[in-house]
Image (spheres, coloured by chain):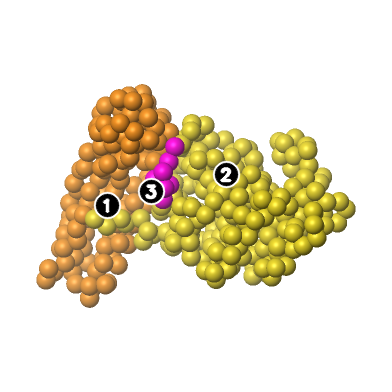
């Protein structure tokens, strides 16, 4: 028995110039917030952007993107939904709605394969993957099925989070995969936004230095984050500057002059 | 129709198989369609006809076989067919058609109510066999 789906994945993603997997081995560090706000910032920088929510069991990017959950249109395949600021968007939640989705590993892989095989992306400069936490099926499937994917690693200054994130970085280094940088989320520091917290040498910036990676941006801890995300323009105010910088950093890495 | 995307995947896979086997002519292809995905066979055949343009074989060499869907509960071991899945409405069927793993959002074991079940058979489209000239 031959599964025909893997054969067309490269063709489906041919209109996509770069695939960026927003990853972190640790949960709760803000991968979805960072991927969605990076998508919006890249759109405002004039780039064509799609976002694929691969956190099947905890899909939430649609909430942040203000995307109405409905069945995608069929036209030669299924067409991504159009979300806030014309970000093309696809999620398991388009099919499961707000139901819980109890999946085991093999089922996760089947679903990912199906979505990659039948989703017809328009030409994009960036397809951002909102990855689930962990170093499990989704990450391994991305490595297997999307060999051109680049990684953006999200961390918080928490020592616990950083320790787990460093394991992911070590794995990505071992596999010689391209990591475009780290994003520090929920930074507790002050004016310059990237002061290391706790003991010197243990913060996200220090981790970036240790791994010889750029710190793409430092997003401050904001108690009012929920209100900002629900506002018509989440990039206005305290979230704007860091994500504009993150977008510049991502664009600057290999896509100069391409719109 | 998203059947066209599936048909395109089948053609691409058969073509790779043909290339890897010295470009020998393709005599027949057996496709298996799982009941769960509920593929529209006419739409799929139209997708094949469109995608095969310019290739030295046509949709007539493709045989369609159906495979009933069966689920197995990991908690109590119950094996049950799709016809016994309660509470499946039109919306849910449509979701499962697009993405068969959506079944895990909507189905439960009819015996014990567990959401922990596997799809034992009849998921989606697969290629059962490809016969090339000289096989």
Q: CA distance from mark 2 to mark 1?
A: 31 Å
Residues at marks 2 and 1 on the same chain: no
Disc 3 crowd rating (10 Å Cα; few below 14, some 14-19, many 20+) is few
Q: Which residue is mark 2?
A: A82
The chain painted yellow is: A
Q: Tell me, yes or no, whether the highlighted magenta stretch contains residue B77.
A: no
Residue A106: mark? 3
Chain letter for the residue marked with disc 1 in the picture: B
Residue B97: % across, % down: 36, 39
Classed neighbour count for the residue bearing mark 1: other residues with Cα under 10 Å, few (<14), some (14–19), many (≥20): many
* Residue sitting at x 60%, y 42%: A61
Mark 3 to mark 2 CA distance (whole Å) = 29 Å
Q: The chain shown in orange is which?
A: B
Q: Secondary structure at mark 3?
A: helix
Point out residue A111 in the picture as x, y percentages from the top left corner.
Answer: 41, 47
Label 2 element class: strand
- The numbered mark at residue B126 is 1
For this rendering, which residue is in front, A101 or B89? A101
Q: Chain of mark 3?
A: A
Q: Is A153 left, or right, of A237 in this rendering?
A: left
């Amino acid at each position: 028995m031959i599964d025909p789906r893997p054969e067309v994945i490269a063709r489906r993603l041919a209109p996509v110039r770069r695939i960026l997997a927003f990853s972190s081995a640790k949960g709760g560090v803000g991968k979805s917030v960072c991927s969605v706000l990076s998508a919006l910032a890249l759109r405002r920088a004039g780039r064509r952007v799609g976002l694929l929510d691969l956190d099947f069991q905890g899909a939430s990017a649609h909430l942040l993107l203000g995307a109405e959950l409905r069945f995608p249109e069929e036209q030669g395949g299924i067409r991504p939904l159009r979300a806030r600021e014309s970000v093309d968007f696809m999620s398991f939640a388009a099919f499961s709605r707000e139901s819980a989705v109890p999946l085991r590993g093999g089922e996760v892989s089947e679903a990912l394969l199906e979505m990659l095989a039948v989703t017809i992306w328009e030409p994009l400069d960036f397809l951002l993957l909102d990855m689930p936490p962990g170093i499990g099926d989704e990450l391994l499937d991305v490595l297997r099925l999307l060999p051109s994917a680049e990684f953006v690693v999200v961390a918080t200054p928490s020592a616990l989070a950083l320790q787990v994130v460093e394991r992911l970085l070590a794995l990505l280094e071992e596999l010689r995969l391209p990591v475009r940088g780290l994003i520090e989320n929920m930074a507790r520091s002050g004016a310059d936004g990237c002061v290391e917290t706790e003991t010197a040498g243990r913060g996200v910036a220090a981790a970036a230095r240790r791994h010889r990676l750029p710190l793409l941006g430092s997003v401050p801890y904001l108690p009012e984050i929920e209100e900002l995300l629900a506002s018509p323009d989440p990039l206005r105010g305290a979230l704007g500057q860091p994500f504009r910088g993150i977008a510049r950093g991502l664009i600057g890495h290999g896509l100069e002059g391409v719109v | 129709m998203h059947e066209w995307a599936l048909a395109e995947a089948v053609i691409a896979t058969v073509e790779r198989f043909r290339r890897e086997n010295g470009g020998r002519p393709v005599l027949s292809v057996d496709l298996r369609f799982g009941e769960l995905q509920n593929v529209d066979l006419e739409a799929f055949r139209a997708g094949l006809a469109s995608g095969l343009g310019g290739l030295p074989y046509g949709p007539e060499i493709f045989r369609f076989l159906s495979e009933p869907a069966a689920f197995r509960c990991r908690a109590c071991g119950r094996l049950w067919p799709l016809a016994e899945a309660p509470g499946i409405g039109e919306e849910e069927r449509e979701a499962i058609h697009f993405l068969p793993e959506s079944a895990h959002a909507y189905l439960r074991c009819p015996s014990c109510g567990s959401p922990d079940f596997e799809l034992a058979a009849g998921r989606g489209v697969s290629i059962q066999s490809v016969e090339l000239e000289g096989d």
